[in-house]
Image (cartoon, grey):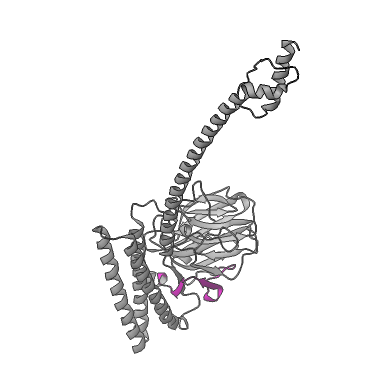
Amino acid sequence: MPAGRTCALLALCLLGSAAPDFGPTRFICTSVPVDADMCGAAVAAGGAEELRSSVLQLRETVLQQKETILSQKETIRELTAKLSRCESQSTLDAGAGEARPGGGRKQPGSGKNTMGDLSRTPAAETLSQLGQTLQSLKTRLENLEQYSRLNSSSQTNSLKDLLQSKIDDLERQVLSRVNTLEEGKGGPKNDTEERVKIESALTSLHQRISELEKGQKDNRPGDKFQLTFPLRTNYMYAKVKKSLPEMYAFTVCMWLKSSAAPGVGTPFSYAVPGQANELVLIEWGNNPMEILINDKVAKLPFVISDGKWHHICVTWTTRDGVWEAYQDGTQGGSGENLAPYHPIKPQGVLVLGQEQDTLGGGFDATQAFVGELAHFNIWDRKLTPGEVYNLATCSAKALSGNVIAWAESHIEIYGGATKWTFEACRQIN
């Protein structure tokens, strides 16, 4: 057989037997007997060396990849451990009612704790919240003391004295814990045990004070009450039993008292099917208070986080989306093009103290309202400046909402939010 034809056949044999891609191909010519198996001879002569080299290269590559995978597994294991520790700490902080707005207007990066741009440690943050709760309980006891003076009851007085004693003990515990933290002696385990201990005592106090306050309920008018949300949680809220009708204009007014910072949270939210932000009032993080209508936003000029009672009102009409904002009876801002020609939709859920991500739920603790709220009223028209002033000064001429009127029978409370006698108008008068 001519040498040229032999080389061609050998090249075909090598190509046929080298289906896997081992890199650049070389063609080798060699002499073989006419009746011999040329393909087998070719592999024996030169292919075996090629295959051996390729196998060694593949083995080296596999070993390198194995080392890389092992290294990546170790990195993943370390990251998983760190993530678990972070989640554990977040769970402890949330369980302690940490102060760090369910759906509100989510902003980029809203998954992080935007309310907590604070330098304090989680333990110090929690103790600060507990201190605020103790102050709230003391205020409620002062109200009970005034009530007991008017209605002399030895049982009420003895219970009040007992609760006052327990509050004093808790204050000493909180102060002691703060001193320990300042001296750097506290550890995560001790912090957790201390939080659980103090929160258990606070829960008991809330229940006892609520029982005492029930004695006042039968002796006060149905609208002379306020709601208290002492901690920033995702389970403490109130629900208005009645929904809103379709509205082409509205006025919403309320009394608020809060010292939460940064941001007082969400005094109220109204969600309808398909739109969680149909009507929302929210102050989130370091942003000013905002009102949302159909997810459209207007910034409001309210400044209310000074721990004092403030009366606020917002009016709006669908025509041109014109709005006005009043604080303590005085107009402080106005604007237009806020959801123009969009009527407020009916058959939704109205919640006090939380922002809804879903219809009636999806609460986020970072957006919860912290403080006290009273006289929440809604009208299906724009109130006049004089009517707003009457409300802010607790005038006898003050109107009740013709859509939502403030009454105990209209409100359901959940998660530890409490009702007690309204004090703002008593202070004004």
Relative depth, front residue between 296 and 107: 107
Give percent across and percent down for residue 293: 58, 54
**For this view, does 23 lie left or right of residue 121?**
right
Residue 226: x percent and y percent? 45, 71
37 or 222, which lies in front?
37
Q: Splitting the image into 4 quarters, where does residue 263 fall?
A: bottom left
Which residue is at 45% across, 73% downward? 418
Q: How many marks?
A: 0
Q: Nearer the viewer, residue 173 or 231?
A: 173
The structure residue drawn at horizontal position 69% and vertical position 19%, both measured from the top left corner, is 11
Q: Nearer the viewer, residue 93 or 163?
A: 93
Q: Quadrant of the C terminus?
A: bottom left
Residue 14 visible, this angle: no
In the rendered structure, which segment of residues is drawn in magenta?
401-424
Residue 306 place in picture, x, y as percent: 36, 59
Residue 85 image position (x, y, % from top left): 41, 55
Is 372 rendered above or below residue 75? below
Outermost residue to the left: 183
Q: Is residue 24 visible?
A: yes
Q: Is residue 409 magenta?
A: yes
Quarter the N terminus occupies: top right
Q: Is residue 336 magenta?
A: no
Q: Does residue 393 lie above or below 221 as drawn?
A: above
Q: Is residue 198 above or below residue 187?
A: below
